[in-house]
Image (cartoon, rainbow, N blue to C red):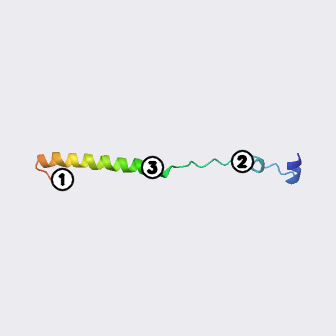
Amino acid sequence: MEEIEKNGYNLNISRYVSTSEDEVQIDMKEVNGRLNSINERIKDNTDKHNEFLRELGLPPV
């Protein structure tokens, strides 16, 4: 009741209860590692794909 009186009897909920949500923390080191892994897999599979294309006499991508 003291807090309500101190706030001029303002009963606005946001004055007494936080409605904000915590921000999600992103581990950039982990994200970078995952992206590097994905890029490496893309490169490996592109190389395999190009090998098949060469066997068929087609230009690589």
Q: Secondary structure at mark 1?
A: loop
Total marks shown come to 3
Sequence-wise first label, 2 or 3: 2
The mark lying in front, picked from 2 and 3, is: 3
Left or right: 35, with 55 as reference point: right
Left or right: 33, with 26 as reference point: left
Q: Amino acid at mark 3?
A: Val
Q: Amino acid at mark 1?
A: Pro
Q: Can you identify the residue that label 2 sits on?
A: 18
Q: Residue at x 59, y 49 (%)?
A: 23
Task: In the rendered structure, find residue 31 and report the number of the disc placed on it.
Answer: 3
Q: Residue at x 74, y 49 (%)?
A: 14
Spatial distance from mark 3 to mark 1, Cα to Cα?
30 Å
The mark lying in front, picked from 3 and 1, is: 3
Task: In the rendered structure, find residue 1 and report the number of the disc placed on it.
Answer: none
Label 2 close to label 3 by CB (< 8 Å): no
Spatial distance from mark 2 to mark 1, Cα to Cα?
58 Å
Q: Residues within 10 Å of mark 1 (few under 14, many from 20)?
A: few
Q: Amino acid at mark 2?
A: Ser
Q: Can you identify the residue that label 1 sits on?
A: 60
Sequence-wise first label, 3 or 1: 3
Spatial distance from mark 2 to mark 3, Cα to Cα?
31 Å
Sequence-wise first label, 2 or 1: 2
Q: Residue at x 17, y 47 (%)?
A: 51
Left or right: 29, with 37 as reference point: right
